[in-house]
Image: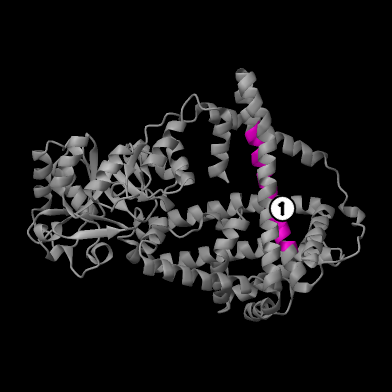
């Protein structure tokens, strides 16, 4: 613990002593990222769509898309650009830390040249080791280094939710995650070793990191924990202190609340950017110190040529602060409040109930859901049963394929989930209960390939008999069937479900249901221009719900309709500006 404290103190000292160097480096990194890397990625993607003739990429066509030779070439190019960006970004910081800890004078151009000499490894088979290394560190990097390109990379929630829905899945997930985390931690020193030592390969760097971590793993974990804890506490403290004046002013002088909120939010945005940059700098200092044991040095005088004026930096910071404040005032004043985003209960209300059951439907209606989503399949006798999976294994614990069973056989079964039990229901049962509760349904047609030829007319006839064609929604992952359904009944609201989408969408349906990982600002605006409604699934944490409700998307599909309804209610014009500022910070950072 004593050595850990020494490492942290030395890191803080070095960053302060070379503070102007870090300002320049981080400014260049961000400019390079936002003015070159991101635009190039967008241009490459649009060019790829044009060359291949695809309009957008979905789970139905992604295999044929990635098999195209031009796509393979562009994917390799983007991977190479990503690896090079991470290498130069973190490598530069590692080299700076190494020189600073040894009191060696340095200039930026020689450091750049040293990194350039290692680029040859990116065009050899050893790049595979670097890809594996970064893949293992992505969860850590996206949390610790949120300003890098790793921040938006994550496993789609619907995949983890499906895995975590069973005990075996949870155990397997925990086991695999534990192994990957351990491997990632033991290989975490690979990049600093590779960038600092001039004549070492990626593979040898990986091996050295693995050997070192045998004796230094605990120390490494302690330092990372100290770093993250200190960073989070500092963010929390600054947020509390900075927002206190706004808390007072909007209660005593409401007319000044908007200006104060804009200034507060701009200040916190700039401070958080600085703090995240400092976290990267501290991370590089700590990694180098524990790798090369250079944590305790006598204080030395920074070279005189590094003492530069602060006036230009202060002037630029002031201009940025004013611009951000004006943008925030305009945004906070014109933000959508009292949004009309529909709250859609996913498979009913699963808290305290079994999914896709009558009890779940009733609970969802009582929780205030605007729509209740249910899954239906056609049985062997041509009827519609409310059930999600193709087999009975997960919920009934029995062998049996839905498409091979009759409706009566299925309705006689009891299904179990999270300690609760219920009976399988028919579509007729659910519609009758929904009509009695005065709530509309979002019906998802699960296609298993054994449907009757008249499956769509039979579904339409059932909805017509219950007089719900104008109030219900129907969706499916089978886009062709939904296009046919829309032509068959133009007044029925029809949508297509996508688990994956990249690129613009122009579908001849009323709405798109898209997994949250693939929803972008550009897509939201494009769909509003058509106009096509956008339902985002499956949002189960407060931050995601808050984000998309504030964006006022057409609907959010969630397992927690009560929470979503409360969050929507909070978005009112009477809400304090302090809450608006905190909401904005939550989904910005």
Q: Position of residue 337 (x, y in %)?
A: 45, 29
Q: Nearer the viewer, residue 503 or 402?
A: 402
- Asked if residue 284 is among those painted magenta in the image, a careful observer would answer yes
Q: Is residue 368 left or right of residue 285?
A: left
Q: Position of residue 346 (x, y in %)?
A: 32, 48
Q: Nearer the viewer, residue 519 or 254?
A: 254
Q: Which residue is mark 1?
A: 278
Query: In this rendering, is residue 174 above or below 204?
Result: above
Quarter where residue 331 is shown: top right
Quarter where residue 212 is shown: bottom right
Residue 551 visible somewhere in the drawing:
no
Residue found 79% across the figure and 56% down from its top:
12
Residue found 59% across the figure and 62% down from its top:
140
What is the secondary structure assignment of the residue under circle 1? helix
Q: Position of residue 512 (x, y in %)?
A: 31, 46
Label 1 Cα crowd, 10 Å radius (few <14 / some 14-19 / many 20+): many
Q: Is residue 461 left or right of residue 132?
A: left
Query: In this rendering, is residue 335 above or below 316?
Result: above
- Asked if residue 271 is among those painted magenta in the image, a careful observer would answer yes
Q: How is the image coloured?
A: one colour
Figure quadrant of the N terminus: bottom right
The residue range painted magenta reads 264-285
- Tell how many labels: 1
Residue 309 visible somewhere in the drawing:
yes
Query: In this rendering, is residue 431 above or below 262?
Result: below
């Amino acid at each position: 613990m004593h050595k850990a404290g020494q490492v942290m103190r030395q890191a803080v000292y070095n960053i302060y002593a070379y503070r102007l160097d870090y300002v320049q480096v981080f400014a260049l990194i961000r400019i390079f990222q936002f003015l070159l890397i991101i635009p190039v990625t967008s241009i490459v993607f649009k060019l790829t769509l044009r060359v291949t003739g695809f309009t957008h990429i979905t789970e139905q066509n992604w295999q044929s898309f990635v098999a195209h030779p031009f796509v393979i070439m562009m994917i390799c190019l983007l991977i190479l650009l990503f690896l090079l960006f991470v290498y130069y970004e973190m490598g530069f910081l590692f080299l700076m830390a190494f020189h600073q800890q040894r009191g060696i004078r340095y200039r930026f151009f020689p450091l750049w040249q040293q990194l350039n000499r290692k680029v040859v490894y990116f065009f050899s088979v050893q790049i595979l080791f670097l890809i594996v290394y970064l893949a293992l560190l992505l969860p850590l990097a996206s949390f610790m280094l949120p300003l890098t390109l790793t921040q938006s990379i994550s496993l789609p929630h619907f995949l983890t939710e499906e895995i975590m829905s069973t005990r075996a899945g949870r155990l397997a997930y925990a086991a695999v995650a534990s192994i990957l985390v351990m491997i990632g931690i033991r290989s975490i020193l690979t990049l600093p070793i590779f960038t600092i030592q001039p004549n070492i390969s990626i593979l040898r760097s990986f091996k050295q990191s693995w050997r070192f971590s045998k004796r230094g793993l605990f120390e490494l974990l302690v330092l990372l924990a100290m770093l993250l804890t200190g960073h989070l506490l500092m963010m929390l403290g600054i947020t509390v202190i900075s927002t206190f004046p706004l808390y007072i002013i909007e209660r005593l002088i409401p007319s000044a609340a908007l200006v104060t909120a804009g200034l507060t939010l701009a200040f916190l945005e700039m401070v958080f950017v600085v703090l995240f940059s400092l976290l990267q700098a501290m991370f590089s200092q700590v990694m180098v110190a524990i790798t090369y044991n250079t944590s305790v040095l006598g204080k030395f005088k920074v070279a005189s040529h590094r003492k530069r004026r602060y006036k230009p930096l202060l002037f630029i910071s002031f201009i940025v602060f004013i611009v951000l404040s004006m943008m925030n005032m305009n945004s906070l004043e014109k933000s959508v409040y009292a949004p009309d985003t529909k709250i859609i209960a996913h498979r009913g209300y699963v808290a305290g109930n079994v999914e896709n059951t009558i009890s779940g439907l009733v609970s969802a209606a009582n929780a205030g859901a605007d729509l209740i989503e249910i899954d239906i399949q056609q049985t062997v006798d041509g009827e519609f049963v409310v059930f999600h999976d193709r087999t009975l294994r997960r919920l009934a614990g029995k062998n049996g394929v839905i498409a091979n069973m009759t409706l009566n056989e299925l309705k006689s079964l009891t299904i179990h989930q999270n300690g609760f039990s219920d009976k399988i229901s028919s579509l007729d049962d659910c519609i009758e209960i929904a009509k009695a509760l005065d709530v509309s349904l979002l019906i998802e047609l699960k296609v298993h390939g054994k449907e009757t030829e008249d499956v769509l007319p039979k579904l339409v006839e059932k909805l017509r008999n219950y007089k719900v064609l104008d109030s219900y929604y129907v969706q499916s992952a089978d886009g062709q069937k939904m296009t046919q359904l829309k032509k068959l009944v133009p007044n029925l609201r029809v949508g297509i479900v996508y688990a994956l989408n990249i690129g613009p969408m122009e579908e001849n349906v009323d709405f798109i249901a898209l997994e949250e990982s693939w929803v972008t600002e550009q897509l939201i605006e494009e769909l509003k221009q058509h106009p096509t409604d956008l339902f985002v699934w499956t949002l189960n944490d407060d931050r995601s719900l808050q984000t998309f409700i504030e964006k006022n998307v057409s609907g959010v599909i969630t397992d927690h309709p009560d929470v979503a309804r409360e969050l929507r209610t909070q978005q009112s014009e009477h809400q304090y500006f302090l809450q608006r500022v905190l909401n904005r910070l939550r989904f910005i950072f």
